[in-house]
Amino acid sequence: MPGIAVIEGDGIGKEVIPVAKLVLGTVRPDLEFFPVEVGYGRWERTGEAITSEEIRAMKEADAILFGAVTTPPDPDYRSVVVRMRKELDLYANVRPVQGGDADIIIVRENTEGLYSGIEEVGPDRATTVRLITRRGSERIARFACGIARERRHLTIGHKANVLKADTLFRDICIGIAKEAGVTFQERFIDALCLDVLQHPNNYDVIVTENMFGDILSDVAAYLVGGLGMLPSGNIGDRSALFEPVHGSAPKHAGKDTANPVAAIRSAAMLLEYLGDRRNAARIEEAIGRVMASGVKTRDLGGMAGTREMGEAVAAALAR
Ligand code: NAI
Ligand code: MG
């Protein structure tokens, strides 16, 4: 019986994750869910957003389903998400952008780059180190090539024309793509952000450094109807965490208006990770059928509430 750690987090995480759990339970009644609390709510209650206790619970799970957390107004606050990614060594952030003209998988390095955490803040000068290592670049390039080998080709997104660190990243990615026999192209990240919107068909698997991938995937969300649609996986060699790309969207919290599709799709990715491709595909197919029947949340021009949308997907699966 696979054990799934479920972290709702804050804001709309508390609405979309129960819906994703409902859909998961419909296709896989054998899954065992256990709740783990991290985030702003926990910080308000206890003064700590996350402790080693929660990290341990996550390490014990077969997979983790995560909503989103709100960043508290605390200058010394250390990002919960960055801490989880580092401690569980979830080095590959996989963000499929699929729908309409797009069938793209963005593979973002998830542990270093501009989110290295190496920072110095003074009154007149602040620096953040953008760390690129051979080990970090090799493993993300291998991961991306592993996906690209089963698909069409790889695009390496970088800014090697300006950033010295990116020549290392680019050269390592090229070396590994050649070694793996993967067809590849390279693009400067700024031009890539525009071209991906104009010619989504030219892209298949895209590999980038941490922050470039963060920005590129929010940009590419435009192709598929916005952030409410985009799922993601954070994958390491021993743990994996699945979450919508969006955050806790406090403006929408508690209103039953958030789109749960990103969270439901993240649950489908979790099943795929557990080796259950059949049910992952069934969930994707059910989402497509429900949306085609006109049931959509407000961000996509529909009228359905969060819960109603999730129940429609669960009902489509039960039919
Ligand atoms: P956000 O993704 O929460 O929301 C941005 C806007 O996108 C929302 O105002 C809303 O209009 C739209 N949106 C996002 N998800 C939606 C959904 N499911 N349905 C309908 N519309 C949706 O990003 P924002 O506003 O920058 O951040 C809010 C909080 O979330 C912050 O505290 C931030 O730190 C946190 N955050 C957490 C993340 C995580 O836990 N992985 C990721 C991104 C942000
Ligand atoms: Mg982001």
Image (cartoon, rainbow, N blue to C red):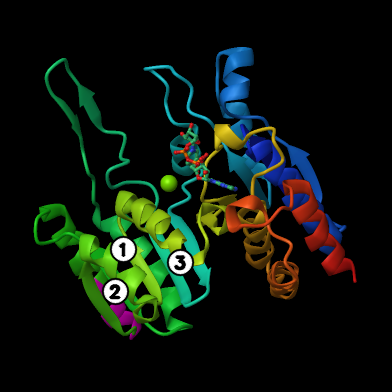
Point out residue 10 in the picture as x, y percentages from the top left corner: 61, 32
Between discs 3 and 2, the one toward the N terminus: 2
Q: Quadrant of the N terminus?
A: bottom right
**Marks 3 and 2 in Cβ contact (< 8 Å):** no
Q: Vertical placement of 10 versus 215: above or below?
A: above
Q: Rate crowding at label 2 as few (under 14), some (14 to 19) or many (20 or more) other CA atoms within 10 Å.
A: some
Magenta highlight range: 174-181
Q: Which residue is mark 1?
A: 138
Image quarter of residue 30: bottom right
In-front residue for pair 315/236: 315
Asked whether the viewer can see residue 313, the reply is yes
Q: Which residue is mark 3?
A: 223
Q: What residue is shown at x 63% (from left), y 38% (from top)? A: 12
Using residue 190 as the reference point, say whether residue 258 is left or right of it: right
Describe the element under mark 1 as helix, strand or loop.
Answer: helix
Image quarter of residue 174: bottom left
The amino acid pointed to by label 3 is Leu
Q: What residue is shown at x 72% (from left), y 70% (from top)? A: 276
Between discs 3 and 1, the one toward the N terminus: 1
Using residue 245 as the reference point, say whether residue 162 is left or right of it: left
